[in-house]
Amino acid sequence: MEGKSIVISAPSGAGKTSIVNFILAKINSIEFAISSCNRKQRPAEVNGKNYHFLSTSDFKEKIDKGFFLEWEEVYPDQFYGTPFYSVTTIWERGKHVIFDVDVKGGLNIKSKFQNNCISIFIMPPSLEELKNRLLNRGTEEDNSLEYRTQKFEEEMNYKDQFDFVIINDNFELACDETLNLITNFLNK
């Protein structure tokens, strides 16, 4: 069985993971596709739940073996990718899959699943607000904060390639709008 695919993408700090968690709590027929990455695990993260944390050499070896549905070098020497099995095992359980992925990864998934996929771009209200969110979450070093805010402008160039854009200036409203879009898509 091939279920439907829901792609949630955004610049880092826009709130996509929080919105995905809200959706997962509301819709039982959806499961989260766990991505892999080679970045350092953050204190609140659980290996195998938030990400599969790999060494750089393991990640590159898996790229060479065609292990990933999609993968990107999102930041210099920081790789993220979605293993094929993360998707197929969810579909085998008769569920739909939701992805929390970077902007290019989201578009790659959309191109593979096309009409069986909805893609939603979560946009922060401003670059200044994005910087504040990144600072407030306390996970960024100065160089990564600077790089993530520079990448924001590049990622904003892709927003019109998504099916929908949601501005996350009010979290509850952004969650409700996203939930409505996904519910309508799943009921088609």
Image (tube, rainbow, N blue to C red):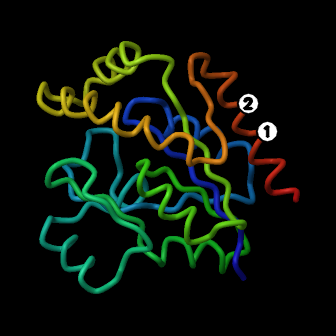
The residue most toward the bottom is 65
Disc 1 residue type (three-letter) = Asn
Q: Mark 2: which secondary structure? A: helix
Disc 2 residue type (three-letter) = Asp
The residue most toward the right is 188
The quadrant of the picture occupied by the C terminus is: bottom right
Q: How many numbered callouts?
A: 2
Rendering quarter of residue 34:
bottom left
Dot 1 surroundings within 10 Å: few (below 14), some, or many (20 or more)?
Answer: few
Kindly check if marks 2 and 1 are in contact, taking CB atoms under 8 A apart as contact: yes
Q: Position of residue 77 (x, y in %)?
A: 14, 55
Observer-nearest of 159 and 32: 159
Q: Is residue 144 left or right of residue 8?
A: left
Name the residue at 62% across, 63% down.
97
In the displayed structure, 39 sits above or below 115; it is above
Residue placed under numbered mark 2 in the picture: 176
